[in-house]
C-alpha cells in the first residue's frame, strides 16, 4: 500500500470538511483583487498552514504581451442618501464596489449615478460581482430590489481607493520530491467575498499541500496562489524555463458546491493527467463529466496557450457559469458544503496517488506465465470476488508489462482500479517477477 | 468578410433558381449521348453563359484501357402501326430510342419487335432510359401502359441513326486563380431529356462558373462538361500530368430534386474537401447524409481510381437510384425545383468559400494569451450570443494556431462556423496577432 | 472457387456432426489428466484418424518458470460404507476422484472424510470436477444430494493412484504446406469425462486436420493436442524458435454446446486472425460475440504471454464459466450437440478459407477503370442481386488493389463476403487485370 492510500483512509471527511470551511470563513471578509493588500492578507492566512514564499512583482513589469498593472487598494466606499444614511456600504459587503474602481467623491442625482450601478434583474435579491481592471472606471454593485426602491435624490458617492505604483503579489508553496519533475496545482486568489469561486480552491490547495508536505514524494509539487490571468501570465513569464519540468498540472477552483465533478481536459487531450483524472473519477463512485479542452475558463487558458501547451487540466465540481450563484453574493459560505470540500480533497489525493505511483515495469518471466502457485501468489479463482479481481490484476500486470504499458495503461485496459493494479505490482516486484524503475517510496519497490 | 460570403448574400434564391431552371428548359429537348451533335448543341448553350473551350477527340483514340467510340447521331426514329400512325416517335421524346441504337429499317410482328422494346412494369406510365454504347443493338423505350395496349400486328420500325468515325466532344471552363492549384468541378452531359440526372448538374456548374468568374480567386477552377465515364477517362488520359494540380474536386449532378443533400466522400475518406463539405453541410441547416466512398456512381469512379486517387467527392441531393424517377421520363422539368437548384448552388458556394479561405496561420504571441482588451478586440463575454461566439472564435484561433491547425481544423474542433473563424482570423491578422500564408484576396490578409 | 469452399459444400452437417459426436463417445470414458495413460489412450484414438507424432517429456524437465510434474496414474478409487457397498466409485464416473489425488487407503468417520469431499450445493444433482496438480492432496467429488444422504459412519476410502517419475505426453499433427509459415490449432487433452470442455475441441481439431490433410495448402498447419497450461508451456519452451513461424493461431475448445459463438481476440487485438474470424462470423448468419483479449482463459494465456505475443485467439461457443454445466458431470455427451459440432467445424473451415486465400494484389490498370464489358466481366447492374454484388466486388477489388489492401481489407471496407471478393479477384487475375503474389493453389493464380 502506498502512503497516500493510507493517508486517505485516515482522513475523517466530516472533520476535514469542517476545517476547510473554517479556513474559508477566515478568508471570506477580505477584499481581494488582482493586486493589493487583500491578496497579501490572504497569503498570510494560508501561510499559517503551509510554508509559502511570497513574490512581489513591480507595476510596469512586462510579462509577455501584458504589463503588471498599478496596485489597487481600497479603504472605504459608499453611497450616501441625503439623510446621511449609507444606503450602499463597502464595509457591509465588499462586492458592493466594482473591483479596481478609481477614486471618486461626488454628489450626483440618481439618474446620473445609475451609469455606475450594476444589478442582476433576473436575480433581484443578489449583488453581482464586477471588475474593471484595464479600463479606468468606478462603480457600485447592489441588489436589483434595492435599486428599484432607491428614491430619486442627489446621492453622495465615495470610493476611497488608490491605484498606484506597487506590486502584484503571489504565493508559492514548493514541496521538493525525489525528482525535479513537477506537479503544478494552481488556484486564483483575486476574488473578494466569493466562496466557490475562488475560496474553495484556495482551501483545497492549502489542505492538499499540508497533507502532502510530510510525505516522501516522487514528484516535486508546486502550489501557486496567484491572481487570475495576470498572475499566471506573470508567473509563466518569470519562470519560462522552469515550465519544462511541469509533467502534470491541475487548476483548482469551484470545488465546494454540491454538484458532481467536471474535469476539463488539457489542450493535449490525452496527457497522462487527463487519463489519470478520468480513471480516478470513473472509479470514484461520484457523478462526473469529462469536458473537452476549450480556451475559455481559468488559468489553464495560459498554461495551455500554444507556446507552453502544458499538460494542465481543470478539476472542479460544477463549472463556472453553470450555477446561478457564480459571481454573485449568493456564492457565499452557505453555498459551499463541508462534505463537498472534503470529497473534492479526497479526489485530488486519489489523483496524486496515481501520479505518484504510476510506473513502467517489465515482466522478468515474459515467456509464458510464471508459476504463481509455488510463490503463494495464486489464490483459487472463483472464490471471493476481491480475490478474483486481485488474481486478474496479477495476470494483467504480468501480461502487459512488456515495457510499453504503464500501470495506468494496464488499469485502463483491464478496467481494474489503479490501486489494485499497483498493489499486485508491488507483490510481483517483491517476488522478482517484475523489475523496473522505482516508483515512489510508497510503492515498496 | 470574404468576397464569396458577400456574393452569397447578394443572391436572390427565387430569381437564381428560376434562371437555372430556364437554362434546363433550353437544354431539355436536346438528344444527348456520349458523342454526337447533342453534346455540341448543349455546350453551345452553356457557352453563351461562360467561356467554354471545346475539345474534339477522334474516334479510335486510345484512352488508358478504353477507345473513343464511333460518333453517334440520330435524325429520326419511330415505330409505325399498319395504319401509318407513329405509335412510338423519337421526335415526341428522345428517351424513346435506346441511346447508341444502330440504324434499322424493317417490318416485323409485335412478337419479334418485343425483343427490342423496354418498359418499366412497376411504373407503367413512365418511359425508361436505356443505352447500349458498347454492344451493337437497337431498341425502343415506351411506357408499359402503351406496350400492353399495342395490338398484335406487323410494325414498321425505323432508327435513322449513324455510327461513324467522328469525335468525342467535351467542354472546359478554366478560371485562372492566384495559384496553379486547381479545384475540379465535373458534370456529365451525355443524358438526353433527363433533368435531375444530368441537366441540374450542368446548370449548377454553369452558374457557379459564372459567379466565380469575376472574382479574384486563390485557386484556379476547372469546370468539365463531359460525357460520363468515357469522357472523364478521356480527359484524365489526355491530362494525366495536370491532375497533380487538382487539390479539391466535386462531381456535380442530381442537385435539383426536393430531397436532402448527400455527400459521398472521396476515396481518401478524409481529404480536405471531405472535411470542408461535411463542415458546410453541418452548419447549413439543411438535411444531409455523409456516405462513404464506393467505387460505383458517377465520374468520381475514374477520378478516384487507384492510379489517380484524386480528392474528389460527389455532392448531390438524393443519390442516383434512390428516387424512382431516376433514369425515367419522370425525371423531367417538373421533378426539379428552382428552390432546390438555388439551395444547391448556395451550398456549393459555401464550399468554395471554405476552399478559398482556409489557411494555416501562426499565433505571433504564443506564450499566454495576448491582451485583446487594449487592442479593442475584447468584447465583454456574457453579452450577445454572437459576440460570445466571436470572442470564443478568437480564443480558439489564438490557441490552436501553432502551425499545425488550419482554420478549418479550428472550426471543426471548436464547433464554430468557418466564416466566423475566418472573420476573427482576419481581425487578428490585422492586429499582427497572427501571421502566415496569405489566404486569398478576400481574406484581408 | 477455392478448394476449401468446395470442401465446405461437400460436407453433410448431420453426418459430420454425428461422426464428431461418435469420436467424443469413444474418448468420454477415459480418465485424462495433465499426465498419464489417459492422455496416451486419447492420443491413440485421435491417431486413428490423423497422423500424430507423440512426444514424451520427462518429469523434472524445466520449462521456463515451470517443471514437468510427476506422472499420475490411477487404477481404482472408492468410498466404501460399513456394509461394504461402494457409495462413491471411480469406476462409475472418473470425476469422482480429484485429479492428481495422492494414494490413500484408510478408514475414517464421515466428519473427517468431509474435508476431502467436494460438492456443488447450488447444483445438488451434479458432480463437480476438481484438480490439485501442484498441492499434494486427495479428494472425492460427489453430488450434494448424495452427500446429504450419507449416514454418519466410518468409511473406507481408497485411492489406488501413483505419482511417479514419468512423462508429460502430447501429440502433434503437422500438415506441411507451400510455405514454412504456420497456422497453429491448439486443444487441451487433460480433462476426464467432460465433453464441451475439452472433448469437443479434440474432435474439432481431429476432424479439421483430417479434412485439410489431403489439400494443397499455402500455410503449414500444426495441430497440438496437449495438456492445458503445462502442456502449452512445455511445447513453447521446447520450440521457442519455431514460434516465429506462427502467423495465425486458434485455441479450440467449447465448440459443442448449443450457444452462439464467442471469439476472444488475441493480445494484439487486430491481428489478421482477429480480423479474419470477425469477418467470417459477421457473414456466418450465426449469433456471435467478439470479446477483447484477457489474460485469463485457456492456452492463449501462454501463446499471448508478452515474450511470445503470438497472434492466437480463442474461437469457441459459450465461454467457459458462462454455462452452468462447465466443469461438472453435466458437461456430458448430451450437453454437446452434433449440429453445433458440425457448425463449429464449418466455421473453422471458413476461417481457414480466408487464411489460405487472403492476398495482396495490384491493379494492372490503375488509371481509371478497365473496360470490363469487352472482357465479358461486366454484367448489367440492376439485375439479380448476386450479380450486383459480384459487379460491386469487382469494382472494389480494382479500386482498392493499390498495393496496400489485402483481399480481406477489401472485403471489410466493402462489407462484402470474402469468398465473393476472392472469386472476382480470381476472375480479374485470369484476365490480367490484377497481378501479385500467388495465394494458394486454389486461387487460380
Image (cartoon, coloured by chain):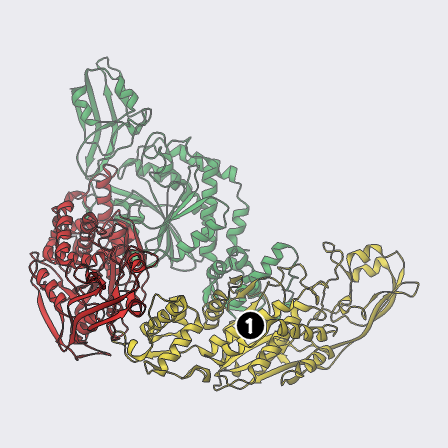
Chain colours: A green, B red, C yellow
Identify which residue, C393 or B82, lies in the foreground.
Answer: B82
Mark 1, secondary structure of its residue: helix
Q: Name the spot of residue C139 as percent of width and height, x first.
A: 78, 65
**Which residue, as the protein is rendered here, is positioned at the far front?**
B83
Q: Name the spot of residue A174 as percent of width and height, x first.
A: 38, 51
Q: Is residue A149 visible?
A: yes
In the image, taking residue C329 as reference, residue A293 lies left or right, namely left
Report the number of numbered marks: 1
Q: Name the spot of residue B25 as percent of width and height, x first.
A: 14, 54
Q: Is residue B435 visible?
A: no
In the image, taking residue A220 as reference, residue C23 lies left or right, namely right
Above or below, A367 against A114 in this view is below
Dot 1, crowdedness within 10 Å: few (<14), some or many (≥20)?
many
Identify which residue, B35 or B429, lies in the foreground.
Answer: B35
**Can you tell which quarter of the image residue A98 is in?**
top left
Residue assigned mark 1: C346
Q: Name the spot of residue C188 as percent of width and height, x first.
A: 63, 74
Identify which residue, A420 or B46, lies in the foreground.
Answer: B46
In the image, taking residue A9 as reference, residue B205 lies left or right, namely left
Identify which residue, C151 or A85, lies in the foreground.
Answer: C151
**Can you tell which quarter of the image residue A24 is in?**
top left
In the image, taking residue B62 as reference, residue C76 lies left or right, namely right
Instruction: Name the quarter where the N terminus of chain A is drawn.
Output: bottom right
Above or below, B399 against A114 in this view is below
**Which residue, as the protein is rendered here, is positioned at the far right?**
C83
The answer for which chain carries disc 1 is C
Task: Please give the name of the residue rendered at 62% of the width and 57% of the height, measured from the top-left corner.
Answer: A387
Task: Please give the name of the residue rendered at 64% of the width and 60% of the height, measured from the top-left corner.
Answer: C323
Amino acid at each position: 500500500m502506498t502512503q497516500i492510500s493510507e493517508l486517505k483512509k485516515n482522513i475523517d471527511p466530516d472533520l476535514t470538511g469542517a476545517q476547510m470551511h473554517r479556513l474559508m470563513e477566515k478568508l471570506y471578509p477580505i477584499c481581494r483583487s488582482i493586486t493589493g493588500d487583500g491578496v497579501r492578507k490572504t497569503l498570510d492566512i494560508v501561510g499559517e498552514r503551509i510554508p509559502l514564499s511570497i513574490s512581489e512583482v513591480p507595476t510596469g513589469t512586462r510579462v509577455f504581451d501584458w504589463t503588471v498593472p498599478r496596485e489597487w487598494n481600497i479603504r472605504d466606499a459608499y453611497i450616501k442618501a441625503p439623510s446621511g444614511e449609507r444606503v450602499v456600504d463597502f464595509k457591509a459587503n465588499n462586492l458592493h464596489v466594482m473591483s479596481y474602481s478609481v477614486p471618486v467623491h461626488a454628489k450626483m442625482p440618481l439618474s446620473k449615478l445609475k451609469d455606475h450601478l450594476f444589478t442582476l434583474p433576473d436575480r433581484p435579491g443578489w449583488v453581482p460581482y464586477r471588475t474593471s481592471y484595464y479600463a479606468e472606471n468606478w462603480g457600485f454593485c447592489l441588489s436589483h430590489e434595492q435599486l428599484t426602491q432607491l428614491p430619486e435624490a442627489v446621492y453622495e458617492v465615495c470610493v476611497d481607493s488608490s491605484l498606484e505604483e506597487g506590486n502584484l503579489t503571489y504565493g508559492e508553496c514548493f514541496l521538493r520530491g525525489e525528482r525535479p519533475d513537477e506537479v503544478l496545482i494552481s488556484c486564483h486568489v483575486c476574488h473578494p467575498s466569493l466562496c466557490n469561486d475562488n475560496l474553495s480552491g484556495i482551501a483545497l490547495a492549502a489542505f492538499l499541500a499540508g497533507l502532502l508536505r510530510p510525505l516522501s514524494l516522487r514528484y516535486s509539487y508546486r502550489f501557486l496562489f496567484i491572481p487570475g490571468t495576470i498572475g499566471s501570465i506573470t508567473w509563466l513569464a518569470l519562470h519560462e524555463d522552469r515550465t519544462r519540468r511541469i509533467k502534470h498540472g491541475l487548476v483548482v477552483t469551484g470545488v465546494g458546491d454540491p454538484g458532481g465533478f467536471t474535469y476539463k481536459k488539457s489542450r493535449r487531450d490525452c496527457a497522462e493527467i487527463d487519463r489519470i483524472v478520468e480513471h480516478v473519477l470513473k472509479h470514484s463512485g461520484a457523478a462526473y463529466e469529462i469536458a473537452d479542452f476549450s480556451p475559455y475558463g481559468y488559468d489553464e487558458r495560459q498554461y495551455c496557450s500554444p507556446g507552453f501547451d502544458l499538460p494542465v487540466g481543470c478539476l472542479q465540481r460544477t463549472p463556472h457559469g453553470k450555477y446561478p450563484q457564480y459571481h454573485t453574493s449568493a456564492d457565499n459560505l452557505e453555498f459551499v458544503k463541508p462534505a463537498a470540500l472534503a470529497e473534492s480533497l479526497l479526489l485530488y489525493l486519489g489523483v496524486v496517488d496515481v501520479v505518484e505511483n504510476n510506473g513502467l515495469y517489465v515482466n522478468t518471466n515474459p515467456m509464458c506465465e510464471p508459476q504463481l502457485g509455488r510463490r503463494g501468489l495464486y489464490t483459487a479463482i472463483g472464490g471471493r470476488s476481491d480475490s478474483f479481481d486481485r488474481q486478474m490484476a496479477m495476470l494483467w500486470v504480468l501480461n502487459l508489462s512488456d515495457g510499453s504499458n504503464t500501470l495506468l495503461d494496464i488499469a485502463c485496459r483491464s478496467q481494474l482500479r489503479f490501486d489494485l493494479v499497483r498493489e499486485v505490482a508491488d507483490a510481483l516486484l517483491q517476488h522478482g517477477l517484475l523489475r523496473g524503475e522505482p516508483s515512489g517510496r510508497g510503492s515498496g519497490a
